[in-house]
Amino acid sequence: MVSMDTLTIKTENKFRSLITRQAYAKGEVICGIPTEKVIDRANRYTVQIGHDKHTEVGKLSALNHSCDPNVILDTERLVMVARRDIDKGEELSFFYPSTEWEMDAPFICLCGSSNCIHVVAGARFLALSTLENHYLNRHIREMMIDLLNNTELHLTQILEV
Ligand SMILES: [Zn+2]
């Protein structure tokens, strides 16, 4: 497992961010995602890795959200990967809905990216057309398909009444 030794948490006015002390090339594995403690509910210190599985991620809980992120959390390989070339000293960020179906603490994104989703509350609150522009983990894709199938079923039932 690749360690988190190259990552530092920076705190400014109680606002935490995660900084890398090393440069990475696009596609490079930066560290592993810890899975020592997996629970069934999301909180601010967890990342979702399955339908009812949320793993406490230690230092990685300082990762902020971005709609144009520089890292990907791959919950199948359980690694954090560089989405593009990253410089030494850069803040790392990932797209929260790529792992989170429904977030414990939603917020408004002010990242300014042309891809900005504005309300960051989890994948279930986003349009498919929006999600298509982003990397999504397998459990999120599966939950999206379940939601669509259920909606279709409900619509059929309504129309049959
Ligand atoms: Zn944004």
Image (spheres, helix red, strand yellow):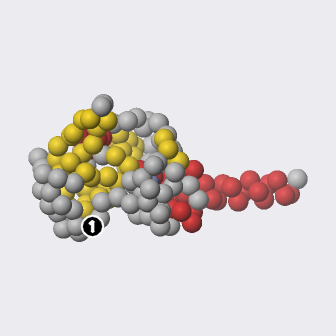
Residue 7 appears left or right of 38: left
Residue 65 position, x and y percent, is: 38, 49
Residue 95 in the figure: left or right of residue 91: right
SS state under label 1:
loop
**Residue with the mark numbered 1:** 84
Q: How far across and how far down the image is residue 54, in percent? A: 38, 41
Query: What x and y, as percent, mark residue 43?
Result: 40, 35
Determine whether 52 is above or below 93 in the image: above
Q: Nearer the viewer, residue 13 or 119?
A: 13
User: What residue appears at the point 30 percent right and 46 percent down from the top-left corner?
Assistant: 63
Residue sitting at x 39%, y 46%: 48
Amino acid at the residue labelled 1: Arg
Displayed-image quarter of ligand 1 = bottom left
Quadrant in the rendering for residue 47: top left
User: Measuring 47% from the left and 36% from the top, which residue is drawn there?
Assistant: 105
Residue at x 29%, y 38% (from the top left corner): 16
Left or right of 45 on screen, residue 123? right
- Of 101 and 68, nearer the camera is 68
Does residue 77 appear anywhere in the picture?
A: no
For the image, the number of numbered tags is 1
Residue furthest out toward the top: 14
